[in-house]
Image (cartoon, rainbow, N blue to C red):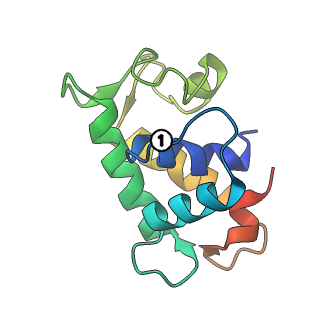
Amino acid sequence: MFPRTLLALGLLIGAGVALSQSAVAEVAVDAALMKVLDPDADGTVDLKEAQAAGAATFKKLNPDDDGTLDAKELSGRLDEAGLKAADPDNDGTLDEKEYSALIEKLFNEANPDNDGTLDEKELKSP
């Protein structure tokens, strides 16, 4: 199972928000996260917003523009087991469709009340 924070952190890092790995205030992380994932500022992230952030992340992680992300491009964001689980055709890469499916899977795992949105509490859940 993927940790819920993978969705948040993966999108956050890929979306270009600069955060120090050393002690960053939780408030700053929350504010930065919501700014990136919640462009309409309604206090929740829906799947459409998560997919949009995921699509932007995919483009940033794919500097060779070959339409796929390999283990090197996903380094620090998805481990070997995660890549294998998200790669149904077993080619060792994620194309945009597979990456989008991963974002949707992570979103659904982070949404235990199944209301179609992630609030701040759900985004903070382990």
Q: Position of residue 93 (x, y in %)?
A: 41, 22
Image-based side of 106 in relation to 100, left or right: right
Q: Position of residue 113 (x, y in %)?
A: 77, 74
Q: Which residue is mark 1?
A: 13
Image-based side of 126 in relation to 15, left or right: right
Amino acid type of the residue tagged 1 in the rendering = Ile
Q: Quadrant of residue 48?
A: bottom left
Q: Quadrant of residue 69?
A: top left
Which residue is farthest bottom?
A: 42
Q: Is residue 87 above or below residue 41?
A: above
Q: Is residue 73 above or below residue 12?
A: above
Residue found at x 42% / y 59%: 51
Q: Position of residue 27 (x, y in %)?
A: 67, 62
Residue 64 visible in the snapshot: yes
> Foreground residue, 62 or 34?
34
> Foreground residue, 82 or 64?
64
Q: Is residue 22 above or below residue 47?
A: above
Mark 1 surroundings within 10 Å by alpha-carbon count, few (fewer than 14), some (14 through 19), many (20 or more): some
